[in-house]
Amino acid sequence: MEQKNHDHSVVDSKFLKACDAPLDDFNIEPFTMVIFGGRGDLSRRKILPTLYHLCQDGKLPEEFSILGFGLPETTDEGYREFSREAIEEFSPRSFNENDWDKFSRHLFYLSADLTRGSECERLCHRLDELAVGSEPERRAIIFYLAVPPKLAPVIVENITQYNLCKGEFRTKVIVEKPFGRDRPSAIKLNQLILKGFDEEQIYRIDHYLGKETVQNIIFFRFANSIFEPLWNRRYIDHVQITVAEDLGVEHRGAFYEQAGVVRDIVQNHMMQLVALVAMEPPVGFEADLIRDEKVKVFRTIRPLDETHIDKFTVRGQYGPGRMQDKEVPGYREEKNVAVDSKTPTFIAAKLYVDNWRWAGVPFYVRAGKRLPKRITEICVQFKQPPLKLFGRPCDVLEPNLLAFGVQPQEEIYLRLTVKHPGMGNQPYMVNMDFNYDKTFDIKKSYLAYYRLLIDCMKGDLTLFARQDGVEAMWSVIDPITERWENTDPPDFPNYAAGTWGPKAADDLMAGDNYQWRTW
Ligand code: BG6
């Protein structure tokens, strides 16, 4: 194997001079993106608005085509109208007619049944038409599988059979999460994709990795020297990660019934957050070097057996409740959800990363829908000082905390004890903080997909999952979903919408003398 030379020497500051190499120096080549599920929910909310922003910001080349592909009958014109409405509704920017005109002429639609191979012929013709004028070697095609997981295999089989992924085309395929529904199906799906694509053509997308604050974890840890010596079991007491949503399943009941919170959030977003906190420093900032380190974390998460699952995991499903002064329905009353559904919408769990750095440090994770707030946060709690020198005997000193706010506040803060002004020796907690909005004074007006779609077009796989990582994540998850699916929950629904989940989640923490973060 080729050995790469990673020169990471840090230049002595007295020799430091400003670097004049341009930032973001890249060119995206002309391409056609085929969006399977082009009229689906994901396309409407995320993909189309993001492509519009990229075009608006001049990131896309002159020549590109976006071909929506899906069952609903419509024309190119109809698709443009659909896209316009989607962008008006879901873009964080105000709508601009001129930019829309420039963008909309690149939009096309093919109404066909994704699952019928013969319809791929029509796709071939359409691709030929769209690629008119471009030289064969410049015909880059990105297939975006924005479809429910069960449709991915048949689409991949069809595009492979029709030789759309090889030959004159240079192709990439973007596969949405969850990749498979357990480890065996993820392996099978991957084998199918590998018949048509090589690993470096496969972009397994997880939009959490496109969020600024998620990317910043790795910067924060490895671009500063002061935290790394503390980043281990000697100084860290425990880690808490919360992915809380105030929304319910909305109109995605059919998908969610199959997925549940574990496949929807934990297997991908949550595992990625755990990996970014727990990973070792990579030897370079290259896709595979970073992904190697993440995979090691997934492999060292302690597998849970049935007894541990019963003891260290809590599942929940929301019932009706009140949120922002409005009555909201329970999960079982949502559209396309079974009236006696056993699907969990909440999880709390205690995990261990069994390696030298983290042995004995619990990682408490929780995720759920219809919780009181939308908040994603990673909180690292440090150990107490060895002696309590300050305060009255009854004062409880808060430990130091380092919190990464992923959303809605994008911030990092360190909680410290200082002396309260006055004659006494009273300890007082303060925050040292860094906040994106305040520091950079930029109004972030794009979605997490922005960075990921550019990276895919550029061919940078750093922020995409690799197959060994996906399999290792499923290995952590599968025992939990299996156990839960084989034992009926006795008490569903067990938390009211608008509350922080079932009581058992608090008991899990209380049993270890901790409590969940509150905001
Ligand atoms: C998606 C899940 O991956 O992430 C949704 O399928 C969830 O169920 C969403 O609502 C949350 O994303 P964000 O960016 O709003 O935290």
Image: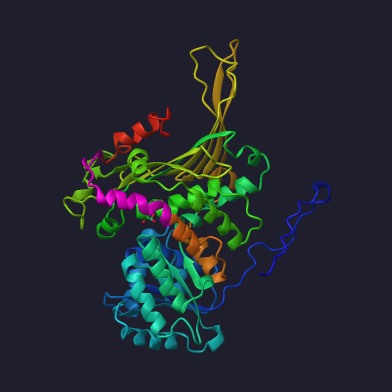
Q: Residue furthest top?
A: 423
Residue at image location 38% in from the left, 29% down from the top: 510
Q: Is residue 406 above or below residue 98?
A: above
Task: Please give left or right for residue 15 compared with residue 128 in the image.
Answer: right
Residue 443 appearing in the image: no
Q: Quadrant of residue 150?
A: bottom left
Using the image as rendered, state which of residue 70 and residue 155 is in the foreground: 155
Q: Residue furthest left?
A: 339
Q: Quadrant of the C terminus?
A: top left
Q: Quadrant of residue 412?
A: top right
Residue 378: give x, y in percent of width and height: 49, 42
Task: Please give left or right for residue 154 compared with residue 273 in the image.
Answer: left
Using the image as rendered, state which of residue 406 and residue 503 is in the foreground: 503
Residue 399: give x, y in percent of width and height: 53, 27
Which quadrant of the render holds ligand 1? Answer: bottom left
Residue at image location 48% in from the left, 67% down from the top: 203
Q: Is residue 429 above or below residue 368?
A: above
**Colour basis:** rainbow
Q: Is residue 52 magenta?
A: no
Q: Is residue 78 above or below residue 122?
A: above
Residue 179 appearing in the image: yes
Q: Is residue 480 magenta?
A: yes
Residue at image location 52% in from the left, 68% down from the top: 456
Q: Quadrant of the N terminus?
A: bottom right
Q: Which residues are magenta?
A: 474-495
Task: Please give left or right for residue 185 compared with residue 286 in the image.
Answer: left
Residue 116: give x, y in percent of width and height: 29, 81
Q: Quadrant of residue 103?
A: bottom left
Using the image as rendered, state which of residue 327 and residue 369 is in the foreground: 369
